[in-house]
Amino acid sequence: MLARVAAQRLHEIRQAFRLSPQASRSFSTALNYHLDSPDNNPDLPWEFSDANKEKVREILSHYPSNYKQSAVIPLLDLAQQQHGGWLPVSAMNAVAKVIEVAPIRVYEVATFYSMFNRTKVGKYHLLVCGTTPCMIRGSREIEDALLKHLGVKRNEVTKDGLFSIGEMECMGCCVNAPMITVADYSNGSEGYTYNYYEDVTPKRVVEIVEMLRRGEKLPPGTQNPNRIRGGPEGGNTTLLSEPKPPPCRDLDAS
Amino acid sequence: MGLGLLASRAMRPIKSSNFRMCARYIVTKPELQSPESAAAEAPAQPDLPPRTPVGGARIHFPNPEDAIEVFVDGYPVKIPKGFTVLQACEVAGVDIPRFCYHSRLSIAGNCRMCLVEVEKSPKPVASCAMPALPGMKIKTDTPVAKKAREGVMEFLLMNHPLDCPICDQGGECDLQDQSMAFGSDRGRFTEMKRSVVDKNLGPLVKTVMTRCIQCTRCVRFATEVAGVQDLGMLGRGSGEEIGTYVEKLMTSELSGNVIDICPVGALTSKPFAFKARNWELKGTESIDVTDAVGSNIRIDSRGPEVLRITPRLNEDINEEWISDKTRFCYDGLKRQRLNDPMIRGADGRFKAMSWRDALAVVAEVAHQVKPEEIVGIAGKLSDAESMMALKDFLNKMGSNNVWCEGNGMQTSADLRSGYIMNTSISGLEKADLFLLVGTQPRVEATMVNARIRKTVRATNAKVGYIGPETDFNYDHQHLGTGPNTLVEIAEGRHAFSSAISNAKNPVIIVGAGLFERDDKDAIFSAVETIAKNGNVIRPDWNGLNVLLLNAAQAAALDLGLVPESSNCLESAKFVYLMGADDVNLDKVPNDAFVVYQGHHGDSGVYRANVILPAAAFSEKEGTYENTEGCSQQTLPAVPTVGDARDDWKIIRALSEVAGMRLPYDTVGAIRSRIRMVAPNLLHMDEREPATFGPSLKPKCTQKMSSTPFSSAIENFYMTDAITRASKIMAQCSAMLLKK
């Protein structure tokens, strides 16, 4: 009897928690299939630029000639930088041709990694970390602030083609959570940068966006003026002196 | 201290005194050091009843010294080295549940359903990917293994829709069966299930991708067996799905097999969708007749209707695959059927009449013409019994102008090695070089092509091809298009001739399309020269093959259906077409009387004066010999249509009406007649190798023309009366053939 009451109560609690605001599950990657559009279809010609062809040769030289397919990720990255931050299907086909595999093998890789954008992105692609530590420290609010400020949806490009916002998995800066990454494709694959901005606040990200819009350079890293890199706010609190060596038994004693 | 140093210390059996330097000892148990000794020390086995391997599988030890012993649930089994734990369990008679593992595909190990407990392993191991080691103690029915399976099952069912009542796989679904056997009776998942967009893979395979459990069997099948790299695994995590990324149809001639290997209802048959439940169907084990391979099939029928065709396992012929033509031609059995004897009236229209009258008309006309003006042609779907009856009947009438279409007019049936596949289909796997002469195995004999592809993949065998430009799904060298290249190789002027002499087990496959050429003998003698120079025919290896096109060809030649004169058709007054639709009837004089006996209103009917309805392969018991010389039997799955009769019975009845009674009344009697002519046709499911090689052949003096070889089959999906009547095959040729 008691067990049944307890089970019922547990069920009620569960039901209460189940009502999450998100009606559908969201995935970190975009669509897993290709839809033809005027700027993205297999009939569009796509080739590595002459400078990048040299780089392709260099990348391929890292791998044995019978394992060319190992170069798929570096080549996709190069193609993405060349094409302004995203991979049209014809670029993936071009990569498949270089490494001599069926195109589907390249699509498999490109859809697996969320760092490969298969839809158009802005010149500055802002990636908000959505993994647990950042989420606890307010990454949702940061994303909302960005989306509201730029007036776009996730994975959508602003009208001027400057910004787009995406989500990313953990980038390993949890100590400075929350953080965003700015992939800067405005200078092609030569001037490509990929910078982390950590300890951001909803207010600060909007400032960052405006600075980028004005073309100002801003140093990457923590945005909290009171912190130095990963160090604690207001200076060190531990390890203030030279650390003591670990205790060791007397090696001479037999 | 480096890891390597640690490991080497751990391996050292004696513990030296300076080893104490290490603060912590590494304890090694003797049984970890040498598993063999542990196995030897194992206590005497209790008396366990002997177990039979799953499915009656036989174990082949390539090297007897490499046998190892493992224990499955305490029961010792001997297995060859390199077997996986799952295979060891199968040998021990324990069926391990699995989704992603398939014995004919590479190992993926991603469904985790085959988890078993292995002693001294901290976690359950995926048995399909774990090599069995000597002395391994595998436990398949412990609480750990059971709990692991139940957990995996719960994860798989998390995103699997509970739509079994509307799913076509219901009743033959691996997921359904295994969740009944190994799953929990309730789930704890209360969130939203995911849904996936369905893909369009063409007119044959229906997709319901939400049901997919990502076992990747179809991806591996398409890549490894079918050789079309279209399918892939896209995305990751819970968003992972099977697809083609870009909109693309599956243009493989083996695509139907993904329906069979899909363990759930994600890939099902489009033509069979919502037609029947598998437990309503009656299965009849039969033989495919759409090509000369004789794939083993099961005809599933309900009442008078064939509802689907599925493959049967035959390691020597089709393994467990069949071509799309074999699988989906069945709807042709319901269309364009001839169901009444008919005669063409003065107005050119057919009128139905009774069997008695029809046979009387035919017998009367047959007696009015001279014996040498009588011609009989057997169709490509004819069984041996009916061809025997046709030949006997025509011989009794005084004519010997009888042949089977596709065999050409100047065939020689003297040497059996000259028209069968001497290497045998499974023997092709031993080859390390192929020379394809005027044959496109991909369209002519799909299952043979699958075998060649398997060999090429496994051993990197070289493939040379002489013939018109065509599609291959493996690496090949296109040597040339016509007989000139053949002569170059025969005379040793071509680079490929040295490749043939250097090969260990070379195979030459000549297409039966060449039978129709006038310079057939010259081409064959050139091929035989190549075979002689390249040492292709040896006592232990016969690599000279002919790849036939039609199911009836081999048996027709075995029974001696060879025309007496090569231009008998021009002077014919009475033509008996037994299902022959692909014979050029333009040469037949206008006043000739044409009888068409067959099951479909196909091209032969247009010229016919009388139609005699016969039974299709799904409705009769008939013997067929495939291209490698293996006789097999079809069995009736459904009743015949209308007033149709078995082919041999019609000819037997006609012979009686014509006053030339054939001396057999039963299938048994006609088979004893066959035994006198070609006894090998009655050795069912046995391959009868040819006795004499081509060395006995007389020297050929024919001139070779330089016309390039042409392709024997224009449209893979439509090659005979049944497939031409099929709507599904018409859709396939419209959508899947390259224009």
Image (cartoon, helix red, strand yellow):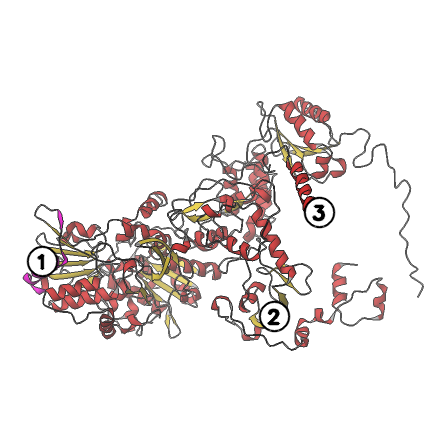
At label 2, the amino acid type is Val
User: Circle 1 is placed at which residue position?
Assistant: B361
Q: Is residue B670 magenta?
A: no
Left or right: where does residue A154 sit relative to residue B222? right
User: Circle 2 is placed at which residue position?
Assistant: B70
Q: Residue furthest right?
A: A253
Label 3 Cα crowd, 10 Å radius (few <14 / some 14-19 / many 20+):
few
Determine the CA span between mark 2 and mark 1.
Answer: 74 Å
Mark 1: which secondary structure?
Answer: helix
Residue A2 — which label?
A: 3
* Quarter location, residue A202: top right
Query: Looking at the image, which is closer to me, B42 or B482?
Result: B42
> Which range of residues does the magenta coloring cover?
B349-371
Label 2 Cα crowd, 10 Å radius (few <14 / some 14-19 / many 20+):
many
Tell me the subunit letter for badge 1: B
Query: Looking at the image, which is closer to me, A94 or B400?
Result: B400
How far from the left and from the top, in percent, is residue B730?
Answer: 31, 46
Left or right: where does residue A146 sit relative to residue B272? right
Compare marks 2 and 1 and give the one earlier in the sequence: 2
Q: Nearer the viewer, mark 2 or mark 3?
A: 3
Left or right: where does residue B190 sit relative to residue B248? right
At label 1, the amino acid type is Val
* Quarter location, residue B361: bottom left
How far from the left and from the top, in percent, is residue A221?
Answer: 74, 33
